[in-house]
Image (cartoon, helix red, strand yellow):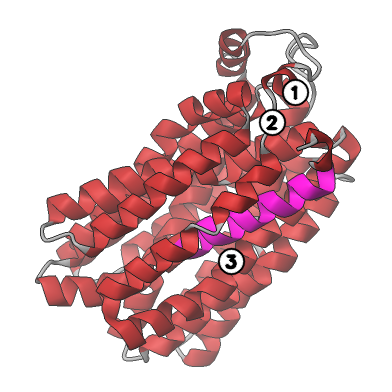
Amino acid sequence: MNPHWRTPAIALAAGSLILTLSLGVRHGFGLFLSPMSLELGWGREAFAFALALQNLVWGLTQPVIGLLADRWGGGRVVMAGVVLYCAGLYGMAHAATPLALAITSGIAIGTALSCCTFSVVSGVIGRRYSPNQRSQALGIAGAAGSFGQFAMLPASEYLITALGWHNALLALGAAILLMLPAALGIVESREGTASVHGSATARQALVEACGSRDFWLLSFGFFVCGFQVVFIAIHLPAYLLDAGLSPRVGVTALALIGLFNIFGSYLAGRLGAVYRKPYLLGGIYLARSMVIAAYLAFPLTVTSTYLFAAAMGFLWLGTVPLTNATVASMFGVRHLAMLAGTVFLCHQIGAFLGSWLGGYLFDTTGSYQLVWWISIALGVVALLVNLPIREQPVRAAVG
């Protein structure tokens, strides 16, 4: 088959479908917390730890997976990830102990997500689009991932209700297989990944990045992003159940986050092509803190929850295209998947803490209140660390 059929538009469409499915299924895991914990007799910390481990493994493996994607092409890496994702969902459905759950949903699916999500897909799209179009293209891909959350959450809830949590996981594993044909659209030749501008080796690019103050400031901001979004995604449904609201409210809230994030991610990508991306990132983190504070300040109702979800959704993953485009501006696109994956590692360390601390502090104090206030404080700190970031090439040889 003629490889020229893989135009930038095809790569963007295929990458968007991959993100829709991989992130859509993953965002629904919080719906399994209550039914699995109740049926298997586990506390919330066991499930929260497994998903926290998933996020940590996702982050720890991302730089290596990104390096492989930069070297061998994103399509091949995605195909391997699909197989591992399906195996993890099958194992998660049959997990009889917290350890088995940690291995399947934590380690297996965490590694699979490294292969099938932002850093790998962004690396392919970043190489296919010019700098003046890159931020917008990444924003479109991010919006697709948000659509997956919007579409797959109601589907996951329906499957759990109709089939039970065990069979629902198996059905989601079958849906993941649809990513295999999409992966063909982002297959890259080894020559293609090596022909982009820049002569630095992967090791040189990583050393250059790790020696950059701005790289670490950007990474800390992404740490905060991970803490906030994963805490909310995993624990919001349980938080609402504890307040006496119906399970449907939690599902609708998470779906609203996905719906409004479609517009937020797209707008962030568009604005990133015009304005300084670190300033936009700082504004998003501050706005999140303000939204959370307002949510806590008013009585908890269905209406306040939906307004909170809509506002948070608009701010949800707009950080991803802005962060990855900033990495590309500073270090070029040849090693984009690896360097974006390194920043993403910090995001996932935050995600681990957001998921695990949510369960731990709830089991310890009987409330999520402290974690909410930690999220607010971290958002303010993220604003401050993003403001001094200089969005300019660190070294011409890298880019």
Q: Which residue is mark 1?
A: 192
What's the residue at 54%, 91% (across, down)? 303
Evaluate whether residue 385 shows in this view. no
Q: Position of residue 110 (x, y in %)?
A: 38, 45
Where is residue 363, by image quadrant?
bottom left
Q: Is residue 204 left or right of residue 160?
A: right
Membership of 21 in magenta stretch: yes
Q: In whole angstroms, how far apart are the C-alphas of marks 2 and 3?
A: 25 Å
Residue type at mark 2? Glu
Q: Which residue is mark 2?
A: 188
What's the residue at 56%, 54% (across, down)? 179
Membership of 325 in magenta stretch: no
Tell me the SS state at disc 1: helix
The segment highlighted magenta reads 7-25
Q: Position of residue 153 (x, y in %)?
A: 49, 74
Earlier in the chain: of badge 2 and badge 3, it is 3
Label for residue 148? 3
What's the residue at 55%, 68% (across, down)? 149
* Mark 2 vs 1: CB contact within 8 A: yes
Q: Position of residue 290 (x, y in %)?
A: 59, 65
Residue type at mark 1? Gly
Earlier in the chain: of badge 1 and badge 3, it is 3
Q: Is residue 390 left or right of residue 164?
A: right
Residue type at mark 3? Gly
